[in-house]
Amino acid sequence: MLTWLVCHGADTELAERGKAGIWDLSMFMECHFPGKTFGVEPAETQSPPRVLKTHLPEWCFKDTFAKCHPKVIVVMRDPKDMLVSYYHMYKKVKLLGPFTGSFDEFFELFMNKELMYRDLFETSLGWWKQRGDKRYLSLRYEDMKQDVKPTIRQIADLCDVNLNPDQVDRIAKYCEFDSMSRSTPIKLTLDEFDVPVGDYLRKGIVGDWKNLMSPSQREYVDKLCKELFAPVGIDYPCN
């Protein structure tokens, strides 16, 4: 939503008065559901600027990116918080099953690379390799939570959009967690898929892993961060 607002001149009124859910404004490239059009094909009929999103690894788009040269924004998050958030999505979003097991069982799936999108570390490393490309922007979720305004300006610079201070403030206010929870695009999307807002936008905080993850699970994830992230300059874990 944040990127969509940047690309549309901070027009929050357009987002609110429209009849499009957030998955219509910013389509998931890999999602296809009966009776609903998502993905690249319907996006081709949209007028620029088009904003698409994905959870797929970078190698899936290697040939496509080489041909069309899109601007790419990659958001990374502490893997411990990411796993806890993913667990709650697995449990509550019907499109994913839903998953009925415990967090310990979910963690086993993670360790065995049996989750949807498989190896979360491999995906992060793949996108991180592109950070030197001027068309890529790598962001940290934790930095956005601390102060989203610098992120808004970074996205605007990447997308060649000029925003004045009032527009930056408007986007920042609209994209606050509580505001997004009440926004029309979120409500339209979740009503369509029969997902309560509280199940989709749950907390959005930093450090929520402490409420669910065991010491041994934390040690396992932090060890992967040290072995895989530290050598290439990814500064996780952050808490």
Image (spheres, helix red, strand yellow):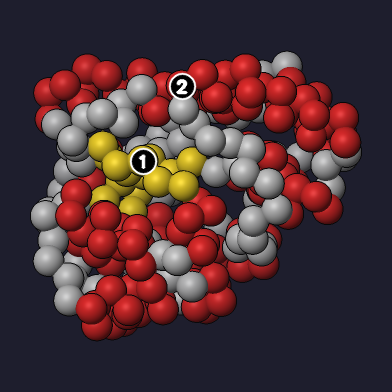
Q: Residue at x 48, y 55 (%)?
A: 143
Residue 24 in percent (x, y) is at 34, 57
Residue 31 in percent (x, y) is at 43, 39
Q: Which residue is mark 1?
A: 138
Assess disc 2: are there few (<14), some (14-19) or many (≥20) residues with their C-alpha within 10 Å of its C-alpha.
few
Q: Which residue is mark 2?
A: 232
Mark 1 and 2 residues: CB-CB less than 8 Å, in contact?
A: no
Tell me where residue 82 sits by quadrant.
Answer: top right
Q: 60 or 136: which is nearer to us? A: 136
Instruction: Name the side, left or right, on which 18 lies relative to 99.
Output: left
Position of the N terminus, as image quadrant, is bottom left
Instruction: Name the side, left or right, on which 53 lies relative to 86.
Output: left
Residue 61 in percent (x, y) is at 30, 24
Q: Give the amino acid type for the residue marked by disc 2 in the picture.
A: Val
Q: Is residue 10 visible?
A: yes
Question: Which mark is on residue 77?
Answer: none
Q: Is residue 82 visible?
A: no
Marks 1 and 2 sit apart, C-alpha to C-alpha, by: 14 Å
